[in-house]
Structure formats: C-alpha cells, structure tokens
Amino acid sequence: MYEKLIHKFEPEYNEAKPENADADFVVSPQAYFRGACQLPGAQYNVGFQIFVKPFFLDRFPHRHKVDEYLIFLGGSFPNLFDFDAHIEFTLGEIGKDAETFVIEEPTIIRVPAGVYHCPLNFMEINKPVFFQAALMQGMFGGIYDFPGGSREMWYNGPIQCKLFPGKKCDSCRACMEADWQDDAWKK
C-alpha cells in the first residue's frame, strides 16, 4: 500500500540548451524530483544539478504562487563549501524595486510567494556548483508577464506521464489532482 510513497530517481538528460552552444554547461545526467507526477499528493519539486561552465540559466523575471528556495553549494563532493563561482541573481520587480545579488559562497535564497525574481546568471564557474531550485508545489511553473497580461506557464521535464503510460508529460497537471491512494497510480 505504501510503495506509492517511494520514488526512485531516474537519470534525466538535458533537453534545453542555449542557442549555438553545447549542453555541457551542466553535468549529465541530472536528477529531479518532479513532484506530484512522481509521488501523488506531493507539494514539492526540486532539481539537483551540477554546473561546470558559465550559463545564463533564467533570463526572464517571474513569480510563483508559493515559496521557492534556491540553494548554491560547492559541487566538489564531499566538501560542499569548496566554492569558487560568481553568480548574479535578481530579486524584485525590474524597474521598481529590483536588487541584484552576487553569490560567491554557499548560499540559500528564499523567494517568497509573489516576489519577482530572475535573471539568474552563472557568470563564472571555476569549480563545480551544486544547484537546487526547490518549489513548494506539485509541479514546476511560474507566472510570467507578457504585453497582453500575465500567464502561468508549467514545465515538468522530459518524463513519461504516470497517469497515461506511453505519453510524455505535457504539464496537463492532472497528476496534481490525484491522491496517493488513487487507483490511477497503480502500476
């Protein structure tokens, strides 16, 4: 009965890469916990990445309906404090109250619900950086401002849908409505 509460990580390979560049800015494979689609009822999702080259990770300011935590540690295990990088991260709304912070040592940032954040730019990496973005909701998504208004956009990675075998996840969010005891999750 409780086996549905256990998730075994599967390796994920980077699908996203910058234009005219290789995807070797991050160690592959990577590990992600994709929230409700992997453990029904989960209200948490997180990625585990090790960056080895500079990369402009997120250029577009956005916000979330829930808190997010960004964690920056040294990626030379076992010493998580062996950190040698220059990362810039903006909190607040650009043109209003935005502040850009420089990260040059192990750091955790709490981004409260509704607070605009990004760009996030890994500008210089002299030693690997272990990065986690942990969002307190069942699927990764953000609210972005467009000329015609705000729109919530979702992304769940290159994974298979658990509700509909053989279908790649298209972020329909049906898994967020399911409960861990729901028969739809039986394999």
Image: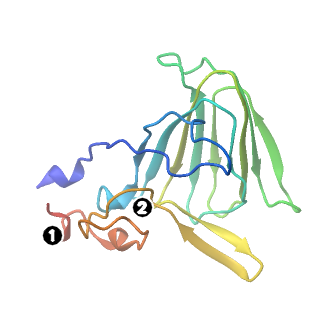
The mark total stands at 2
Report the amino acid beneath label 1. Asp
Task: Judge whether 42 appears above or below 131 on screen.
Answer: below
Horizontally, residue 93 falls left or right of residue 183, namely right
List x then y, in percent, for residue 68: 57, 52
Residue at position x 43%, y 54% in the image: 44
Residue at 26 percent across and 43 percent down: it is 8
Q: Eyeballing the image, is 74 above or below 72?
A: above
Residue tagged by mark 1?
183
| Residue with the most extreme front position | 20
Q: Is residue 131 above or below residue 91?
A: above
Q: Position of residue 32 (x, y in %)?
A: 42, 46
Q: How is the image coloured?
A: rainbow
How far apart are the alpha carbons under marks 2 and 1? 19 Å
Assign a secondary structure to mark 1: helix
Q: What residue does disc 2 label?
A: 138
Q: Are marks 2 and 1 in contact (CB under 8 Å)?
A: no
Q: Residue at x 63, y 27 (%)?
A: 106
Q: In x, y percent, where is residue 148?
A: 74, 83
